[in-house]
Image (cartoon, grey):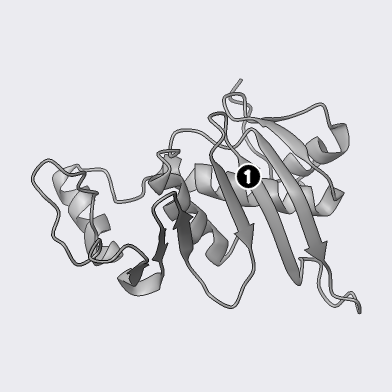
């Protein structure tokens, strides 16, 4: 979930206009671990991330990589290398109008990074967006570990009412390493 999942969850958060926040609940936890315990991450999982406005992201490991948006009019799938498929005939092929929403586009992440340094722009996905997407993935992993629904406060960035799950947010660093206290 924290490998390619971060990329696809980032697209989902962007598409749902959730770059500045996170889910309030992680539920419907279904997980399978390797029966021989050869590794500690799930061999397969599916979790649902619910946001304060009721929007949801269902994150599952499947045969098809990418992000699928489901709406009342159809589905839109976005995959790697700018692959896009839409069930609404003509929706992808028709050019955007002047008044339509135009998203920040980057065909080359390295060049985007250089351009941002050179011209003082924000990159297509800045550090805050990356942090929020990685947090969603980590919350999914925590819910898989504890095997139950967890509640999340996206403002305080705390797990609510679950001490066991909350312990997975931090760990003891090996001396002499640590993080500075910014509080």
Whether residue 17 is situated above or below residue 15 in the rendered picture: above
Residue visible at 60% across and 46% down in the picture: 136
- Residue 51, percent from left and from top: 57, 35
Label 1: few (<14), some (14–19) or many (≥20) C-alpha neighbours in 10 Å: many
Residue visible at 64% across and 68% down in the picture: 61
Out of 103 and 133, give the one closest to the viewer.
103
Whether residue 27 is situated above or below residue 81 in the rendered picture: above
Out of 178 and 166, give the one closest to the viewer.
166
Asked which quadrant contains residue 69, the reply is bottom left
Residue visible at 63% across and 44% down in the picture: 49
- Residue 155, percent from left and from top: 57, 25
Out of 87 and 129, give the one closest to the viewer.
87
- Residue 161, percent from left and from top: 82, 26
Q: Is residue 174 among the parts visible in the rendering?
A: no
Q: Is residue 102 among the parts visible in the rendering?
A: yes
Residue visible at 16% across and 50% down in the picture: 118
Q: Is residue 25 left or right of residue 57?
A: right
Whether residue 91 is situated above or below residue 142 in the rendered picture: below
Q: Is residue 60 left or right of residue 84?
A: right
Q: Is residue 182 left or right of residue 172?
A: left
State the residue position of label 1. Answer: 49
Q: Quadrant of the C terminus?
A: top right
Asked which quadrant contains residue 52, the reply is top right
Find numbered disc 1 in the image and state the secondary structure of the residue it sits on: strand
- Residue 128, percent from left and from top: 44, 40
Q: Is residue 67 left or right of residue 56?
A: left
């Amino acid at each position: 979930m924290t490998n390619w999942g971060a990329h696809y969850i980032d697209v989902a958060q962007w598409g749902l206009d959730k770059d500045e926040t996170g889910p309030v609940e992680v539920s419907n936890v279904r997980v399978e671990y390797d029966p021989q315990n050869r590794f500690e991450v799930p061999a397969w999982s599916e979790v649902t991330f619910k946001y304060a406005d009721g929007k949801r992201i269902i994150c599952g490991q499947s045969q098809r990589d990418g992000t699928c948006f489901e709406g009342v009019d159809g589905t839109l799938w976005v995959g790697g290398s700018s692959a896009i498929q839409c069930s609404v005939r003509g929706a992808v092929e028709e050019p955007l109008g002047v008044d339509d929403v135009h998203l920040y586009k980057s065909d080359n992440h390295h060049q985007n990074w250089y351009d941002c340094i050179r011209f003082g722009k924000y990159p297509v996905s800045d550090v805050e967006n990356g942090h929020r997407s990685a947090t969603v993935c980590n919350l999914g992993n925590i819910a898989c570990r504890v095997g139950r629904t967890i509640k999340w406060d996206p403002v305080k960035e705390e797990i609510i009412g679950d001490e066991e799950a909350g312990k997975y947010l931090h760990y003891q660093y090996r001396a002499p390493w640590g993080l500075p206290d910014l509080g």
